[in-house]
Image (tube, rainbow, N blue to C red):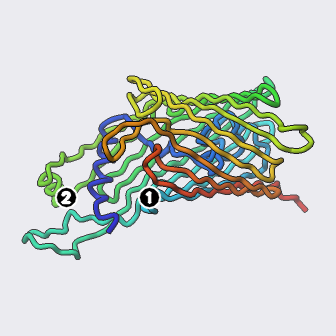
Amino acid sequence: MKKAGFLFLVFPTWLAFAQAPKYSNEFLHLGVGANAFAMGNAVSATMTGVNAAYWNPAGLGVSKEWLEVSAMHSEYFAGIAKYDYVGVAHSLGNKGTLGFTFLRFGVDDIPNTTQLIDNDGRINYDNVTTFTAGDYAFMGTFAKPLKKPGLSVGGTLKVIHRRVGDFAKSWGFGLDGGFRFQANDHWKFGLVARDVTSTFNAWVFSLDEDMQQVFIATGNELPTNGLELSLPRFVGGVAYNSPIGSPEKGFYLTSELDIDITTDGKRNTLVSMDPISIDPHLGLELAYKNLVKVRGGVSSIQQYQSALGEKNWGFQPNLGLGIGIKSFQLDYAFTRLGATGTGFYTHVFSFKLKLNQPVKT
């Protein structure tokens, strides 16, 4: 019965999102690809190919693959919540590159215990049903290189659907945009504007009379239809790549520093102001050609509270490994959810496959 309390844990969370902009659509900022997780999500300047459609749309403009496919599955909170990602990218040659991204974050088989006690005051387990609380995002991306060498631009249209059983649902739309500039073989820069025009989710609630009575009896306010607003978030990144020893040996070290700037009020970040908060994160990658890549990163530098009530500064460590075999790449990340002291570790796997255009016979 791990999920028994999720009805009144999850539902008020969705309700709170519908009333305030802070942390709205936060599932869209979890990340995709084990390679990015391992580097502390510091990839806005270096990420190219299909996964770049999520991290920085402009990075997709560098891709010249006829078709590129990527997928990832991860689980949170001892497997209660599941997070899935699928991405597809197709190069149009000099015209640019198209990408499609699908995301789902959901909790399935949540017991609905609102009717556990019947009208006669008796406990009746036959009245317990289950439902799913899920967030879905469908993203279409277009990117292309510009006339200036090394400079590319991209944009993403997002369609968002969020649903809590038959009780509540919403549809939303948003736009992301990005620039990427590779100055030379060493320096790369990225700039991303997420929800650049703000993203709106229109919520509709459908509570039957019995559930309304439960909300009233438990002191909860009845939710009303309304709009949920996601304010803009900006990400800037700078990366440096250099060979270790002579380039012929094939060893390279890449480091990247990203800075996330949110505009929805104070957050638990290194720099917390109102309405702006600043969250830096750093990633490192040691690569041997494209065969083996060892990664590490630091993210979520924030304060946490111990069991004794003491507040200390901590961070989220990340480690990972990537293996490439011709057109196939497998990535793994070992990361912690939250700052030091939370103890929730998770394993993330993802893969990427490049396909050439079929030869006509």
To which residue does mark 1 refer?
A: 81
Which residue is rendered at x = 50% and y = 33% of the image?
Answer: 195
Camera-side residue of 337 and 70 = 337
Image coordinates for residue 66, horizontal then vertical, percent: 78, 50
Camera-side residue of 158 and 257 = 257
Q: Amino acid at mark 2?
A: Met
User: For residue 280, which quarter of the picture?
Assistant: top right
Q: Is residue 256 visible?
A: yes
Local packing at callout 2 (Cα closer than 10 Å; few below 14, some 14-19, many 20+) is: some
To which residue does mark 2 refer?
A: 211
Q: Quadrant of the C terminus?
A: bottom right
Horizontally, residue 287 falls left or right of residue 135, namely right
Which residue is rendered at x = 62% and y = 49% of the image?
Answer: 319
Label 2 SS = helix
Q: CA distance from mark 2 to mark 1?
A: 24 Å
User: For residue 254, which quarter of the picture?
Assistant: top right
User: For residue 19, which quarter of the picture?
Assistant: top left
Local packing at callout 1 (Cα closer than 10 Å; few below 14, some 14-19, many 20+) is: some
Horizontally, residue 335 falls left or right of residue 118, namely right
